[in-house]
């Protein structure tokens, strides 16, 4: 295989390297943005579970308090119904909070693909300057 001689000057070569490096940096920023957007969307959903779960637990707490108030105010059979409803609502809220928390602990927020391509780009740049 024959090698063709490059007739470009050193200044032209550095200018081309600069343009390619700028393009590469822009592409890396776009990749990082896309990757973080995907991760943020998933985390947003999980945070929504936490918020809804917290609100449901709060409603359950209010129902339990109502049951305690009813119990203390007058001993009537319907206090037990309020207590059971409050317990069920609080249990459901607890389930939602646990689901959101578990999903968040399993989510890897590190932009791994971007880190790998940055390492590859650093190696490429080193090779280009040798």
Image (cartoon, rainbow, N blue to C red):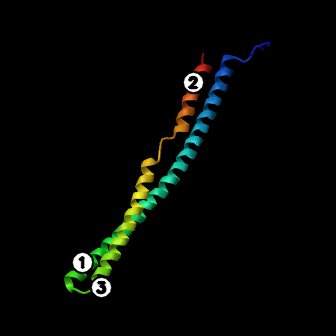
Q: Mark 1 and mark 2 in contact (Cβ < 8 Å)?
A: no
Quadrant of the drawing holding the N terminus: top right
What separation in Å lies between label 2 and label 1 (alpha carbons)?
68 Å
Outermost residue, right side:
2
Circle 2 residues within 10 Å: few <14, some 14–19, many ≥20 = few
Q: Is residue 99 above or below residue 82?
A: above
Horizontal side of 119 relative to 55 (left or right) equals: right
Residue that badge 2 annotates? 123
Q: Quadrant of residue 5?
A: top right
The residue sitting at 25% across, 82% down in the picture is 70
Report crowding for label 1: few under 14, some 14 to 19, many 20 or more residues within 10 A (C-alpha). some
Q: Nearer the viewer, residue 88 or 28?
A: 88
Relative to residue 18, is residue 46 drawn left or right?
Answer: left
Residue 55 visible: no
Q: Secondary structure at mark 2?
A: helix
Residue nearest the observer in this picture, 110 or 81: 81
Q: Position of residue 87 (x, y in %)?
A: 33, 71
Q: Which mark is residue 68?
A: 1
* Mark 3 surroundings: few (<14), some (14-19) or many (≥20) residues within 10 A: few
- Label 3's element? helix
Which residue matches tag 3?
78
- Name the quadrant containing residue 72: bottom left
Q: Position of residue 82 (x, y in %)?
A: 31, 79
Q: Name the residue: 55% across, 33% down.
A: 116
Sequence-first tag of 2 and 3 = 3
Q: Is residue 16 visible?
A: yes
Give the percent coordinates (x, y) of residue 90. 35, 69
Label whose residue precedes the other's in the sequence (2 or 1): 1
Q: CA distance from mark 2 to mark 3?
A: 74 Å
Left or right: where 110 falls relative to 26 = left
């Amino acid at each position: 295989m024959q090698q063709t001689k490059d007739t470009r000057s050193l200044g032209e070569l550095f200018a081309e390297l600069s343009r390619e490096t700028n393009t590469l940096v822009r592409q890396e920023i776009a990749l990082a943005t896309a990757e973080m957007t995907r991760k943020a969307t998933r985390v947003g959903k999980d945070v929504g579970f936490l918020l809804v779960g917290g609100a449901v637990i709060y409603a359950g707490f209010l129902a339990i308090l109502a049951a305690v108030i009813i119990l203390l105010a007058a001993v009537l059979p319907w206090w037990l119904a309020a207590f059971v409803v409050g317990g069920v609502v609080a249990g459901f809220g607890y389930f939602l909070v646990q689901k959101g928390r578990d999903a968040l602990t399993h989510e890897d927020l590190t932009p791994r693909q971007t880190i790998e391509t940055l390492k590859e780009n650093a190696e490429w740049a080193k090779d280009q300057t040798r």
